Image (cartoon, rainbow, N blue to C red):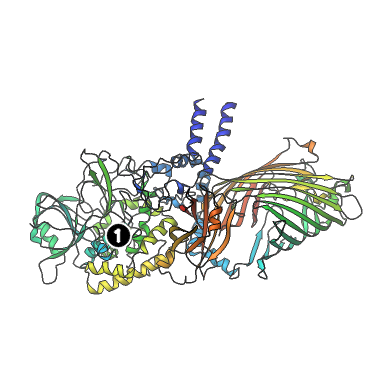
Amino acid sequence: MPRVFIAICLVILLSLPALGLADSKGAPTSPDEPIVKIAPPPSHAVRQVLYFPLKLPAYALRAATLPIGLLSRLIERERIIERAAELLSNREKTLWAYPIIEGGAGTGFGGGMGLTHIDLFGQGYNLKLIYKNHIDLSQDASASFGKPLAFTMSGIPVSWATNVWWMRHTDEDYYGSGPSTTRATHSQFLVNHTSVGGGLAWQLLPPLSLNFGIGYDIATTGPNSEGSFLSVDQTFVPANIPAFGRWIHYISIGFKAQYDTRDNVSMTERGGLHSASITRFQHAGIGSYDYIQYELDGRHFFNLGFKRMVLALHGGLTFQQTTSGGQVPFYRLATLDANSPLRGFPRGRFRDRNFIILNAEYRFPVWDGIDGVGFVDTGRVFHSPSDLSFNDFKYSAGGGLRVRALGLMLLRLDIAYGGEGINTLLGISKSL
Amino acid sequence: MRYGRRNTIYFVLPLVFILSSCAHEWGLRYPPSRWIVANDRQSILQPGKEVPFVYPLGATPGYTRQVEMLFELTARVAEIPAKALPGGETPALNVNNFDEIPDSAWFTNRVWRRDVALDELIRGPGNVVLPSAKAFKVTAMGDAAVTQWLAVQGNDGSEYIFSFDRQDRPTMATGAAFIVSRVLFAAGYNIPPGNIVAVDPKWFSLLPQATLRKPEGSVRVATKDDLEIFFRRTTREARSRLIRAYVIKKPDGIHLGSFSFSGRRHNSNDRISHQHRRELRGLDILCAWLDHRMVIDSHTADFFIPGADGRGFVKHYLIGFEGSLGNLSAALAHIDEPTHPQTKLKTTSMKFPPVTLYSRYELLPKREQPTPFDAASLSPYWWEPWVPNPALWNATKRDELWGAAILSRFTDDRIAAIVRAANVEPGVEANLLDVLGKRRDKLFNFWLERINPLGNFGASFKEGEAIISFEDIAFTAHVPDIKGSSYRWCLRTANARKMLIDWQISPHSVISLSKDVVDHMAIGRTYVIEIETLRPKSKWSTPSVNVFLKKKEDGIIELAGLARH
């Protein structure tokens, strides 16, 4: 009971400003120059003590990254990032060219270039081009074109976009489907995948949007041309790798509702991104591969009272429901891997019709331009909703660094362990 | 651990973190007035014993560091500034809603708040009028690196400190003391009254118990020969037996010794840790400008001002400016390492607290190559005082902006008036003006591009329309290449859910809210104008300044505060 009482007092003390019970103010002698008691808020000293354990990882990382820290201070003082960014953009900051670097989780090291224009023709059109290549000769390319808030429909602002996406991965990983697959069945395949689509987004409220998309998707798979593992058709019977070696055409139609209250898309400190979507994939060819995919995703960011000290929580759920007795092509199964993110496991590690993923990530400042992270990921795949239980969840944990500048995350390095070896991930995209 | 206790922790801890993250910005905790007065002059008991008022030591005296330093982990032992530690940057804790500081026992807003006339600028903290009967009893004397000094008692009981120039640097120490005291007083700091006088050695005689403090800090009884040698080493006025000196009069009150630039004195008036006081942090840019490298604990003075009942309050002063304007560096140039006693300050004569968090640099200031007093060798980022100063370490960009705003009020003609009044040697005067101007501009150019330099916000209301005006301090500071700057702004609700006026660009430092917009604003609700500054030669807009507005019951829009990012 006393502990509960003390805990409640702490809660009230720390939330005094939130409850509007600020420090007492002196009676003004004149309206223009009131005499006031100047003091830190009551929560200040308490927080300094309470938050000391949260600062410990940062102290440890500082010791480990001292040379990087000294370099980052020099970079900050000489404004090197701004100068580099000036080289990579035009004067109006509407056209950007940027290098891409990534690696880990089975893809091998790779890189590429991106080009973005946010005001093409001076009319507000957005154009984005990306090309990536990896040492295993896997390639990705995409182009998107659109216009945000292009017109209104019944007073609601509407954006539109079209995109083309192509990938040729020479050694995608496949371990089989289900939560209990092992590394013994690690095999690989080649996939050639092209997708064309477009969509509209209605901005019902500033943070709330409703999206509609339609697309055409064509893909084929075959034996891997790179990589050291057996091809999937040598490891699995055809029944376990539906659609292998076939051209699969899909017409997709989907709806998505999204609620975005993040204060910064790249290095979020407050707010959340929550979405629900439903997409129908209608196979336009021989064979029954139709399915509907449902996705629920929620991520929220809590600032822990100090700048750049953030707790991020994420939960995601993906369901695939086949129709007309069909099957989902093996390479389109819901995948739980480092990109989900279950960062301790490599690409394509767990596949099945459905998955659930839960993440907690603690981000903290280490140096001026570098944040540290510690994270715990857990999730599992399952074949049908009735299979979902608290057994067979996979766990991974780790830490990493985020290089930031100009309010953006420039580079991410994560090192995670999930029981199957250490995974090192490097990239420019954020994990949460 | 029992199941129930674990559950309590699992429930309480996240709630603690989440609720504390919901806490309002500190900035709107005070009345919505730009100028407020701190009530730090409440009557308290005298918080310490009286200490003789003499010229400050060149090193930190043995005062106990406050225990709270351990909690802050500013790593004094490792000599890492708090703001360099993760999440360690703490905004100044004594600022009001408008990022200004209140008038207090530490500081009085002067040159930034109002126009200060030239004669007031030159008069500074006040001229000392020596007693008509010029007979001073020397209670202590000493030799510091940059000056020689006498602590004396007048026959009217007043106490004074006279500091003198060295023969190899005539008018420099006294000139520096005069100039820097005027500048810092105009800025708002408490400075003892002082001015330049011409004194006759015959006015001074030793008290029997008078002491002589040597450069390394050791103290012994002074003799008549010491006094004679003392005056032989000082500079005489041309064709006169008089000697130029800078005299300060001991302020009213009981001298309690120095204050520390970190921690607190732990009385009910001293509520803010000194390293988190804006006026102390803001000394970073002002002292870098003036090369006042002795901005250390020992060059401060606390005076207890007693009332009729013996209770009173403490007033905090800055003292000892003779080493500014390059004098310290010049004095160091004459020191032969490692034999000169100045480099081997004897610390055994000082008292140490039982638990010390002093770094070795504070006990024995680090030696370094003396840097010339010019603009080229000034590094705005790396400039640091003689010994590490926790308040300066903790200075954030907002504190530097505050200092730069004050510095912007020292225009060329004002600096010239002060330097001229110091009556330094002719060649030196021209050089000083040139160097001070260039150093000031260099500091502006560095700091004012690293933060959105908007300040002096004001609001007026006319015929239903609200006009928000502000000052771009970079313009006041004549930062080059900013002609053609514009300001990108929007008006939204404080929770960012609704935009009343979408982002637009204004070429002037004025924002006008039309009657329609004002009518749409709800009474009592907080709104925010976000303002970014766009410079013509930069691709980057500055981080925004958020100006908080509220509509009062009578429909008038008033400024509630501001927050800088």
In the rendered structure, the answer to whether residue B313 lies left or right of residue A196 reads left
Judging depth in this view, the residue of B237 and A255 nearest the camera is: A255
Q: Which residue ends up furthest to the right in the rendered image?
A: A286
Answer with the quarter of the image where residue B413 lies.
bottom left
Q: Chain of mark 1?
A: B
Seen from the viewer's position, the closer of residues B241 and B412 is B412
In this rendering, the count of numbered labels is: 1
Answer with left or right where residue A369 lies relative to residue B479.
Answer: right
Pick the front one: A297 or B226: A297
Where does the image place residue B146, in percent across and percent down from the top left?
Answer: 24, 61
Q: Residue A142's spot in the image, x, y percent?
A: 74, 62
User: What residue is rendered at 21% in x and 67% in y?
Assistant: B171
Question: Dot 1 corresponds to which residue?
Answer: B186
What is the residue that sits farthest to the front in this orientation?
B463
Q: Position of residue A176 (x, y in %)?
A: 80, 46
Amino acid carrying label 1: it is Ala
Q: Which residue corresponds to the image point at 71% horizontal and 39% vertical from the top-left?
A: A393
Image location (x, y in percent) of residue A272? 63, 47
Quadrant position of the N terminus of chain B in the picture = top right
How many residues crowd mark 1 within 10 Å: few (<14), some (14–19), many (20+)?
Answer: many
Q: Is residue B540 visible?
A: no
Front position in the image: B140 or A229 = B140
Res. B250 visible in picture: yes
Query: Circle 1 — which element?
Result: helix
